[in-house]
Amino acid sequence: MTTQSEKRRHHRIIFKDPKKIAALISPFDYEEPEEAVPSAILNMSEGGIQISVERSLLDGICCGRKILLHCISGLPGLLAFADVPMQVIWVMDNEHLDHVLVGAAFGNLSEEQETSLRSFVDACMQAA
């Protein structure tokens, strides 16, 4: 993991091997975990997340849409970070690639989720 210092509101944690860091997401109105699609987490901050989603699984995920982050695997410090509402801010779609990049902002986080995320980011910043 590395951090990136730039003119952003929150420090961003970039994962060197995103294949090991995964999330299950779905459009907000598909709330059942079995309807969720896997994605690779490329980076995240206290404000949001960037993920890569296989094009064939992208159904219902578009700019402005609310989505639900069901869970994250590969980051033991974020086990409590589940069922997080997010809003898709941007989608980078190159028709020649198999995956689509999605940037989403975290919605209303519970106090426990905020604390968990802040502790994770702080630990990554200290380790960098």
Image (spheres, rainbow, N blue to C red):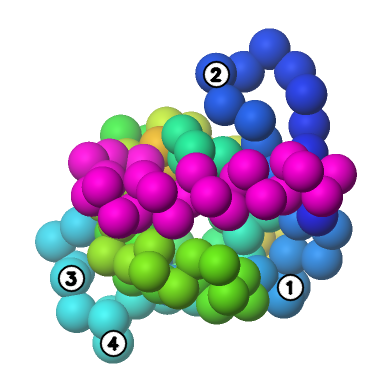
Choose the circle earlier in sequence order: 2 or 1.
Answer: 2
Q: Which mark is residue 31?
A: 3
Q: Quadrant of residue 64?
A: top left
Q: Looking at the picture, how far across and down is residue 96, in whole percent?
A: 74, 53
Asked if the residues shown at circle 3 and circle 1 are in contact, with their CB atoms under 8 angstroms apart, the answer is: no
Q: Residue at x 26, y 47 (%)?
A: 111
Choose the circle earlier in sequence order: 3 or 1.
Answer: 1
Residue range (magenta): 106-128
- Of helix, strand and loop, which one carries label 1? helix
Q: Which residue is mark 1?
A: 19
Can you tell which of label 3 and label 2 is closer to the viewer?
2
Q: CA distance from mark 3 to mark 2?
A: 30 Å
Q: Which residue is mark 2?
A: 9
Is 34 placed above or below 127 here?
below
Q: Amino acid at mark 2?
A: Arg
The verdict on residue 80 being magenta is no
Q: Which mark is residue 34?
A: 4
Q: Residue at x 58, y 53 (%)?
A: 120
- Of helix, strand and loop, which one carries label 2? loop
Q: Looking at the picture, how far across and down is residue 59, in whole percent?
A: 36, 63
Can you tell which of label 4 and label 2 is closer to the viewer?
2
Q: CA distance from mark 4 to mark 3?
A: 9 Å
Quadrant assignment for the N terminus: bottom right
- Of helix, strand and loop, which one carries label 3? loop
Asked if the residues shown at circle 4 and circle 1 are in contact, with their CB atoms under 8 angstroms apart, the answer is: no
Q: Residue at x 68, y 12 (%)?
A: 7
Q: CA distance from mark 3 to mark 1?
A: 24 Å
Question: Relative to 31, is 97 on the left or the right?
Answer: right
Is 73 placed above or below 55 here?
below
Is 20 placed above or below 127 here?
below
Q: Main secondary structure of the magenta part?
A: helix
